[in-house]
Amino acid sequence: MNKPTNLKRNVVESILWMGTSSLVSQAVTWIVTIFVARILMPADYGLVALAGIYIGFTEYVNEFGIGTAIIQAERLDETDIRSMYSISLIIGAIMTAVTLFIAPFVAAYFNEEKLILIIRVLSITFLISSARSVQRNLMIREMKFSLISRIEMVTRIVTSVVALACALYGMGAWTLVVQYLLQNLLGFVGSAWYERRLPGAIRITPEFKKMLSFGFGIMNSKILFYCNRSADSFLVGTLLGKTLLGYYTFALMLADKPFEKIVSLLHQVFFPMFAKMQNDPERLKTYLLRIMEIELLILSPIFLLIALTSDNLVLVMLGNKWESAILPLQVFSFIGFFKYFENVAGMVLTATGRARAQVVYVSLLFPAMAAGIYFLAQRYHLNGVLIAWCAIFPLLSCMYFARIVKLIDISFKEMASIFKLPFGAASVMVIMVLLVSGAVQTGNLNMLTIKIIMGIGTYLLVMVLLDKEKTFSMVRMLQIRKADI
């Protein structure tokens, strides 16, 4: 069997494994997330979100782009692996020590004394992540996604159950801290069990230097991305307080679920695949167009149904205390489309060794978003933050996506062809759900059920009417003939 066919088989098997495990774990985690949110207060989520601003930034420094460099490297031997592992552990130890020292200063800035202990406890994750990074990314490089899926499924289920127990016990914000720590620890144990690598003496080979250089560029890119992504939470927490930050971050988390459970899952498979195709742009384009159409067919109804049902969804699932999260959830669901285009562009550019393009993009996006949020939040409070998202992010993310369209020479006709079916069906779905919402007056639970059934039914029906052959092809997912690859 030839290499391209093996690649196709690995991709399909990986998606099936990851999709199945995600469905199983998702059922548990969604239920637990809802119960935990009903028990905790928005301020609890806001407090942990404040700690997360610092922890998230430091994690990218801690990772140093080593994981991505391992996946992207064309050649990799055992000496380089052991050297990278040692570097990773050294950085992790340094970042833990720095965090233990700096925690009081972070807490003082936000005027939240409780943050000191939370940040210091969370610093343990830097050592765990450093120990896990090389092993897990070697598994990704070798496309061992069935193993990764098993680890993640067990991790999600166990941490969800523990989180629910902590919430019921009355641990408040510490529920989220314990869940995060345990998630990292179980991920390390699982990766170490299957990929039993050890650190070794650091030896400076040409490939090692190349990987460090590439990883450093990736780290800078990710830090810029994180600063951009965290600017909103930082400014909301600073200007509006931890309670509004709790509403904001929880709505953002719910809207990002399609990314966490679908896009990120699939792109774990596609990134190493595209890295292998980095010197074959025509083949890369063929795969990318088909993958994007499949993903948009899945994501379009999800994003739009979350936006259309968010009022009923929040009140039914979370209760009246979360009512202020409704508008942010609607906005972030709409923004999800543009995050998707940004994500695709970043994945392709990184896989083809063009990390610098990400740095240029974020260097434009970060100051624009930060300035917009800062000035609008002071005048319009939380609504101002949402206005900034709607006015700035879609424009710049589309410009970024246009970079890969030009890079791999995608024509306007080719791009329009992948939008036709998902956006056509989604448009009709939106109209039907809005008509039903205006015509039917009933309770939140009944309305939520009606909207979901009407939305999904309309979407599937219109898909079949617009393109029956392609619809059934998409049901079988990656229908890529051997002649194409």
Image: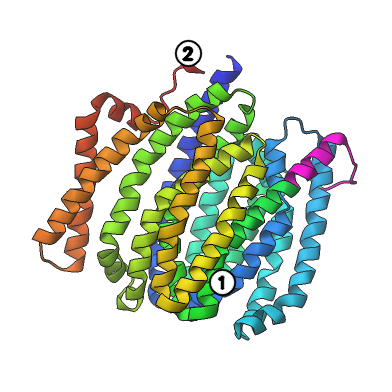
| Element carrying mark 2 | helix
Q: Mark 1 to mark 2: distance in Å?
A: 51 Å
| Element carrying mark 1 | helix
Above/below status of 257 relative to 38: above
The answer to whether residue 365 is seen in the rendering is yes
* Foreground pick, 416 / 86: 416
Above/below status of 194 relative to 235: above
Q: Is 221 on the left-hand or right-hand side of 433?
A: right
Q: Within the magenta stretch, is there residue 90?
A: no
Res 483 label: 2
State which quarter of the image contains the N terminus.
top right
* Foreground pick, 203 / 107: 107
Q: Within the magenta stretch, is there residue 211?
A: yes
Q: Which label lies toward us, 1 or 2?
A: 1
Q: Residue at x 54, y 27 (%)?
A: 284
Q: Residue at x 48, y 24 (%)?
A: 286
Per the image, the residue denoted by label 1 is 234
Three-letter code for the amino acid on which mark 2 is drawn:
Ala
Q: Point out residue 448 in the picture as x, y percentages from the top left corner.
A: 22, 60
Three-letter code for the amino acid on which mark 1 is drawn:
Phe
Q: Residue at x 70, y 53 (%)?
A: 220
Badge 2: how crowded within 10 Å, few (<14), some, or many (20+)?
few
Q: Is 149 on the left-hand or right-hand side of 322?
A: right
Where does the magenta region start and end? 199-215
The answer to whether residue 192 is seen in the rendering is no
Q: Point out residue 473 in the picture as x, y percentages from the top left corner.
A: 33, 26
Res 206 label: none
